[in-house]
Image: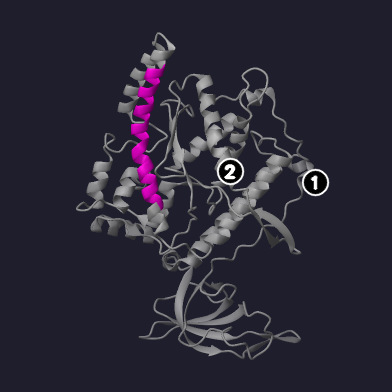
Amino acid sequence: MSLLTTVAGLRAAQAGVAQPLTTVRHAHIDDHPLVLIPLTLAGEACAPLAAMLGTDRDRPVLLTVPQPRDRTLRFRFAEELADLLLPRIEECRAESETYEAGRPKEERERYTRAPQILVPNPGGIEFVRLLGRSTRLRRTDGPHAVAPTVPLLGNWLTWFADRTDFPGSGLLLAMTRLLTDHWATGQSPTENAHLPSLMAWIDPPPGRTGAEAALLAEDPGTHPPAGPTTDPVFDRTLHELTTARDAAPDDRARAAVDLLIADELRSQLAPTWELMWRGVDLLRALPAAGRVPDRRAVDRTVFTHYATYLEEDGRPRARRDHAASAARRLSHLEDSAARYETERAFDDPLVMARYELTGEAFTGTVIDRDPDRMIENGRSRLFRPGLTLRVDTRPLLAPGTAVRCAGRDGLKAEILDRREVPGAGWEIELRLTGGLGRVRKPPAPEGVIPDLGEELCWTTLGGYMTPAPLPAEEETPWTHGGPPQPYEPTPDDAEESWG
């Protein structure tokens, strides 16, 4: 938690309403996201009890498992979920576009859309991960065979859960994380994991403060937990109903109990369904950050790659990553994290302010410029214009530090000097080193070099380097496990339990 987030939380507690942490929305919200609210049986890692899902706010679909301990009913639930989710994925594959990528540039194809799943909290993401792990290795023939759509569903759920580890991905998102990325409340991070109380702080009802509304929202009778865990009081009701179902004398009596169980489960999920769509409305009200479309393009690209892989190969992901795959994944995760934090700061002055507080950025006004400066570099001369900025606070970055301009993509500089001006703040002298285009000597075209009076933010962010390419899997050296053998599920894999 940054200092700015802490201050915003204190202001929220004082004002009685959540305070904004950003000026723009840093996540893509699809026009028709699939909202998924799962419930699991208490005491079980991933025994599905119910799920409410859909893309239409007014027409949610309820899936129930009247007896979660019944293996047949659990896989019937997975089959019903597949019948709803897989067509949604196929819809996103209807149209494609051509784009250029790689070095040298080459034309490639990707889909114009990618699916998006919204769950209430990180527990919902873990449910997706466990359900994918429990279904992707199932066999479609022999003993305990499942419908062909079940392992396909497992492959997709595993992929969705895997993409949540990459910062900036918009394929599977938790609403509580989305909201706390954009607003600070007057309660603890643990309390923010409770969607009803979090929404109460951000959007309290008229006449109540966020604290008062959050206190009322903690009543499970009014606002049941947002899943996947259930309320202990409801667990007693559920136990009585499932016991009555097991004791039913015939199918007709059992079906009547199933209807009662479905009604009870609907009452637990309906309030969260409304909260999820209120959260979508709040996020849509924020303008999207400038780099959100670029990150969504990455989502569409990886979605295209995985859909193509399932068509051409189709083998499920192994239970454990090979050494080379794990190294490649770690490299991509580190690169994604660095890029995401930089993009957020460059898109949003409130996010950049956090780095100004830590001394990793400063904002100054151009008070002098040397647009024709040339410097000696051995036998040649380099075009290196100079700028002098005035800042209000003492800069923490030392001379020799390389910085980038947040307001002008690609403009780079080196700090030459910093000096205090009594009664007038500080002056920082910069030498531009990049972002000048193909200009090799003065004069530079108008607008290339910042003008007098222009206010600019400079930061050390963005200094990441693209990781060195790893060898192809078939060329993996023996020190890293050797070339991985094609993964084929074994009978032991297929016997993986729901837990």
Q: Residue furthest toward the right?
A: 475
The answer to whether one can see residue 335 in this image is no
Do residues under tags 2 and 1 come within 8 Å of each other at their CB atoms? no
Q: Nearer the viewer, residue 53 or 459?
A: 53
Which secondary structure type mostly characterizes the magenta part of the structure? helix
Q: Nearer the viewer, residue 396 or 219?
A: 219
What is the x, y in percent for residue 61? 44, 36
Q: Which mark is residue 475?
A: 1
Give the magenta part as a residue range.
Answer: 255-280
Please name which of the two marks, 2 or 1, marks the residue nearer to the observer: 2
Which residue is the site of mark 2? 89
Which residue is painted at 47% across and 59% down in the image? 26
Q: Residue furthest top?
A: 249
Question: For the residue carrying disc 1, how many other residues have a C-alpha within 10 Å: few (<14), some (14-19), or many (20+)?
Answer: few
Q: Secondary structure at mark 2?
A: helix
Task: State the image coordinates of residue 489 (x, y, percent, origin top left).
Answer: 69, 29
Residue at 53% across, 20% down: 72
Q: Is residue 256 magenta?
A: yes
Q: Please, what is the three-letter code of the amino acid marked with disc 1?
A: Glu
| Residue 131 occupies quadrant | top right
Classify 33 as above or below 73. Answer: below
Q: Quadrant of the N terminus?
A: bottom left
Tell me if 354 is positioned left or right of 85 in this view: left
Earlier along the polypeptide chain: callout 2 or callout 1?
2
Is residue 72 shown left or right of residue 204? right
427 to 82, vertically: above or below? below
- The residue drawn where x is 48% and y is 54% is 29
